Image (cartoon, rainbow, N blue to C red):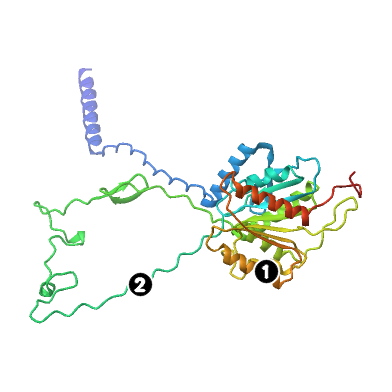
Amino acid sequence: MRVTISAFILSLAVCLIGYQAWAADEPAAAPAAEPVKEAAPPAPPPPPIPALSVRREQQQNTLLQKWYGEQTVSLKTSAGDFVGIWQEDTSGNPVGALLMLHDASQMPDWPAQLQPLRQYLSQHGWATLSISLPEPVPRALPPRPEPVKLPAPAPAEGAEAKNPDGTPAEASKQPEAKEKEPKDPAEKPADKDGQPPESKVVYNDANGKMGDGNLPPAQPPKPEVLPAPPAEPLAQERISAGLALLKEKQQYNNSLLGVGLGAARAAYFLVQHQGDPAQQAPGGAPLTPPFQALLMINPHMNITGLADFNLTQAFSNPKLPVLDISYRDHPAAPNAASIRKSAARKNNLAAFEQHLVQEPQGSDLGEEQVNRIVRGFLVKYAKGKQIKGGAEAP
């Protein structure tokens, strides 16, 4: 019995020793690999923003709606909405309406010209609609001429020849000194231990690219700036939208007034719509043209971007009454006024008035003079009658 037990124990010990030897030959299990961190996706590009002139007009429209409240009206064009200021007649005896166009870099209620006119005319039977116009195309800067290169003066006899920068000419003939450090990083000398120098290229977390660690992080991408819509086609579209709003308000005896660039744009509108048919007011009113008269205050003769247009082209209709007011203090005003007067005489305009006045500077005599001239011209050439149901109002 003891012999059997001893043999069993011995065989068990041999098996254990063999298992340990076999286990020692097996390779150790590799530790679990850490999950690879995926690089963060690049930030999406910022949304595009409108052009600077469009953003300025948007801010201006917000201020106008805040200041004038219910007087502001929203008009639509293919390029978006814009703002106008509507002033109803406050006299109780309406005789017509006036569509007003401001000058460049101004707003629909510019204090020096349009604001006093709107308030004054509304007290004498005239409703007004002053609309916002886009900024004009800036004039291109002329090319800068190349500087004239003068030849180097000949050295005097016995004088040492010098370079244009003042250094001796012989110094430029000396061989250039070798650079202490080669330009190619691969050609840099090895360190003391024979190993190449450590690379300075590091990973930039800001843009996900490799770069020099000494440089500041790359700036985020700038938003794309959308181009502004063409100024002059948009201005003409807005004038048409203003005329359509006057018709919605049952105004069919309308005149057109412009200041500075607004006057040139008004003239261009009339040139482009000379063949338009007369409009028919409801209730049996007589046929009338879209605008009864053209009123200009210190007008521009041309429009940047329209090389073939001149303001005097609007004088081709001899039946169109035209009022021309110029500021005598402007250097080019007398000469330009003389050109317009000659064009009006050449085209046999039936009604053409021209005035040289003092430029309004707030509540002064110039402002009052302009108000009286405009009102007198409208009463003389563009006064209408209120019609209800095909008959004159009592």
Q: CA distance from mark 1 to mark 2?
A: 39 Å
Mark nearer the viewer, 1 or 2 = 1
Residue 81 seen in the figure: no
Residue occupying image coordinates x 67% and y 51%: 100
Quarter of the rendering containing residue 325:
bottom right
Which mark, by number, is residue 146? 2
Q: Position of residue 144 (x, y in %)?
A: 39, 68
Left or right, 196 with respect to 292, comes to left
Dot 2 amino acid type:
Glu
Residue occupying image coordinates x 56% and y 55%: 228
Residue nearer the viewer, 373 or 237: 373
Which mark, by number, is residue 359? none
User: Pointer 1 and pointer 2: residues touching (CB < 8 Å)?
Assistant: no
Quarter of the rendering containing residue 315:
bottom right
Q: Position of residue 86 (x, y in %)?
A: 70, 44
**Label 2 packing within 10 angstroms: few (<14), some (14-19), many (20+):** few
Left or right, 143 with respect to 91, comes to left
The residue tagged 1 is 313
Left or right, 148 with respect to 25, comes to right
